[in-house]
Image: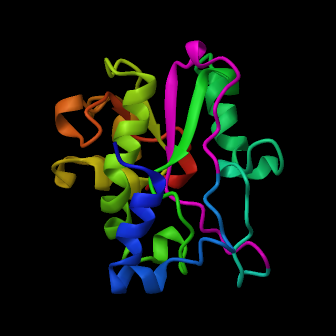
Amino acid sequence: MITEDQVIQNILIDSDLSKSMLEIKKYPLPSPFIPPDKEKIKAFILGADPSNFSINGKETRKISCIFDIGNDKRYFSSINQNLIQIGLSQNNVYVQNMVRNYMDKETQHNPKWNLFADKWLPYIKQEFDSIDPLRKIPVFVTAEIVIKFLLHNSSNLGRALSYYSATKKIPIEPSENKLERNKFPSIDTKNIH
């Protein structure tokens, strides 16, 4: 069983990645959002990472829970609205990031993002499997970079419109992705191109 500390140590021994990770003591890992009753979980929501640079565009704002759920509503509001549209609420979802640690660049400008995601993948897969060992609970992914990373063949990724107009099949089958679960391209439509 792999632990958070082991993932962090694997990152720290990689000199290239360790330079890009913000200090863990100053920027501790945000907690996943876990609903009060785990038995009611109907979906996993998977974000990219907590790096945000929302303090004057220069400094990352620390959050204690992923998407700052329970504090600042702006980070999760569009996802929450989409949950409502499909009959779910925060009481039915487990929310986590693919990359748990803060980095020196935001996701879309981070050329090392996939390398960090490789380090975190076994942990995230194990975390989801501990909640749902039969892998029946689907994953809603909030960013295109996460979808591409998780696909065995990223050339199979369609554009958002192709999924929503049903010209591209959803869900993405377990055999097609690294989490081995049904995966839906995005629950936050403004973050996928």
Of 149 and 104, nearer the camera is 104
Q: Magenta segment range?
A: 31-55
Of 41 and 193, nearer the camera is 41
Of 3 and 49, nearer the camera is 3
Most distant residue in the right direction: 71
Give how far across and how far down residue 148 sits, in percent.
30, 54
Label tally: 0
Give how far across and how far down residue 139 sits, in percent.
42, 33
Residue 84 falls in image quadrant: top right
Residue 30 lies, with reference to residue 21, above or below; the image says: above
Q: Which secondary structure dominates the residues rendered in magenta?
A: loop
The answer to whether residue 163 is visible is yes
Q: Is residue 92 left or right of residue 130?
A: right
Give how far across and how far down residue 130 sits, in percent.
41, 28
Of 89 and 68, nearer the camera is 68
- Residue at image x 60%, y 43%? 32
The answer to whether residue 113 is visible is no
Q: Is residue 32 left or right of residue 129?
A: right
- Residue at image x 28%, y 33%? 172
Q: Is residue 79 magenta?
A: no
Q: Is residue 85 left or right of residue 143?
A: right
Residue 121 lies, with reference to residue 78, above or below; the image says: below
Q: Quadrant of the N terminus?
A: top left
Q: Quadrant of the C terminus?
A: bottom left
Give how far across and how far down residue 26 sits, in percent.
69, 74
Residue 190 lies, with reference to residue 129, above or below; the image says: below
- Residue at image x 24%, y 40%? 177
Q: Is residue 41 magenta?
A: yes
